[in-house]
Amino acid sequence: MTSFDRQVGLRLLNLHQFVYEKTGGLVGHRLGRIHTLLLRTRGRKSGETRTAALLYLEDRDRFVVVGSKGGSDVPPAWLRNLEADPQVELQVGTRRFPAHARVATDAERRRLWPMVVEHWPDYARYQSQTERVIPVVILKPSP
């Protein structure tokens, strides 16, 4: 992937997130067979709310996302934020609700990784680009 491709991809992601937020989730939740959610975390340094649009899978009563950052050797900021404060807010379509976030255990990751790769095959390529183990994150809605 070239630098230009990354820049275009980032701009499209930013536009997608902007539309998702501005329409209250009426537009942006579904992109063909792909579903996205908005993950809101508290900045570990700033304390400000940070939002990331992420692909997700449902697993039982939980949502599953991947901390890939496109195969970067550095984890995404949202992952570091939720590790510092696992109480997050999710927006799935028009629904907003609190959730608890945690990185999947090794056993959970072994079960979930093939599912997320089937859902978005680029995750396999991302993993091959980095030496870090790309984490799978489980988001459990709070009661």
Image (spheres, grey):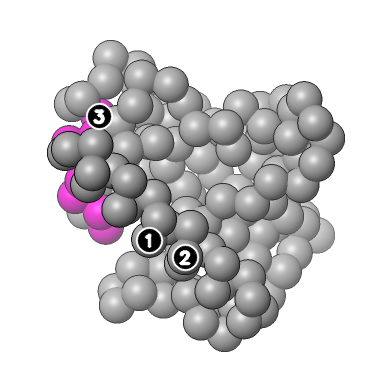
Kindly check if marks 1 and 2 are in contact, taking CB atoms under 8 A apart as contact.
yes
Q: Nearer the viewer, residue 128 or 7?
A: 7
Helix, strand or loop status at disc 1: helix
Label 2 belongs to which residue? 15
- Against 32, is 97 above or below? above
Q: Tell me if mark 2 has few (under 14), some (14-19) or many (20+) residues whose alpha carbon lies within 10 angstroms of its own.
A: few
Report the label total.
3
Q: Tell me if mark 3 has few (under 14), some (14-19) or many (20+) residues whose alpha carbon lies within 10 angstroms of its own.
A: some
Give the dominant element type of the magenta stretch: helix, strand or loop.
helix
Q: Is residue 104 left or right of residue 44?
A: left
Which residue is located at x 18 percent, y 26 percent?
A: 128
Q: Amino acid at mark 1?
A: Leu
Residue found farthest to the front = 4
- In the figure, residue 1 lies in which quadrant? top left
Q: Locate residue 125, reporting x and y percent.
A: 17, 36
Q: Is residue 107 left or right of residue 18?
A: left
Q: Which residues are magenta?
A: 119-127
Asked whether residue 128 is in view, the answer is yes
| The label number, if any, that marks residue 12 in the structure image | 1
